[in-house]
Amino acid sequence: MPDKKLILIAEEDKMQATLLAFRLRRNGYRVEQVSHGEAALNFLKQYIPDMIICGIEMPGLHTFDLLKFARKRYNREVPIVVLTTSSENRLHSKLFEAGATECMTKPVDPSSFLDMVELELGQYKF
């Protein structure tokens, strides 16, 4: 069981965010859920999450700006996963260059999602 790691979900699709948050909470994680870029930025100014999961089309703040802020503040210590409807390699490459540690294409498979979270947080059981 995870040691109550804090995960920020900043996702514009509230249904997707709610499902992911439910899955994470059920597996022992603490989750802060926001749907607007400014709310994500305000949270990141006050707290240090163990992981950030964000959508690519958040209103109020471009995802690339959020990546830039998080990387400047936390360097590479906090994994950042970007959820996108595009499986385009060029977009994923740009996201990785901007600081994303992982990209997942929506709709997100719940089991794969949880495996990825545990792997990124070093809690995956082989």
Image: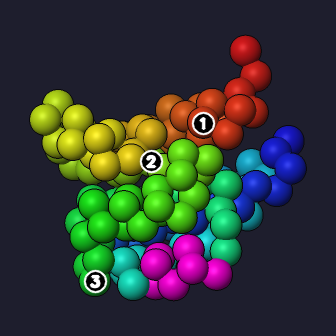
Q: Which residues are magenta?
A: 39-46
Residue 82 location (% of width, % of height): 37, 50
The amino acid type, in three-letter code, at marker 1 is: Glu
Residue 23 location (% of width, % of height): 62, 53
Element at label 1: helix
Residue at 46%, 56% (x, y): give it.
71
Q: Using the image, determine if residue 12 lies above or below residue 74.
A: below
Q: Nearer the viewer, residue 69 or 33?
A: 69
The amino acid type, in three-letter code, at marker 3 is: Gly
Q: Which residue is mark 1?
A: 120
The amino acid type, in three-letter code, at marker 2 is: Val
Horizontal side of residue 106 vs 27, given as left or right: left
Horizontal side of residue 59 vs 35, given as left or right: left
Q: Which residue is mark 2?
A: 81
Residue 65 covered by magenta stretch: no
Q: CA distance from mark 2 to mark 1?
A: 9 Å
Q: Which residue is mark 3?
A: 60
Q: Nearer the viewer, residue 17 or 65?
A: 65
Element at label 2: strand
Among numbered discs 2 and 1, the one appearing first in the sequence: 2
Residue at 74%, 48% (x, y): give it.
27
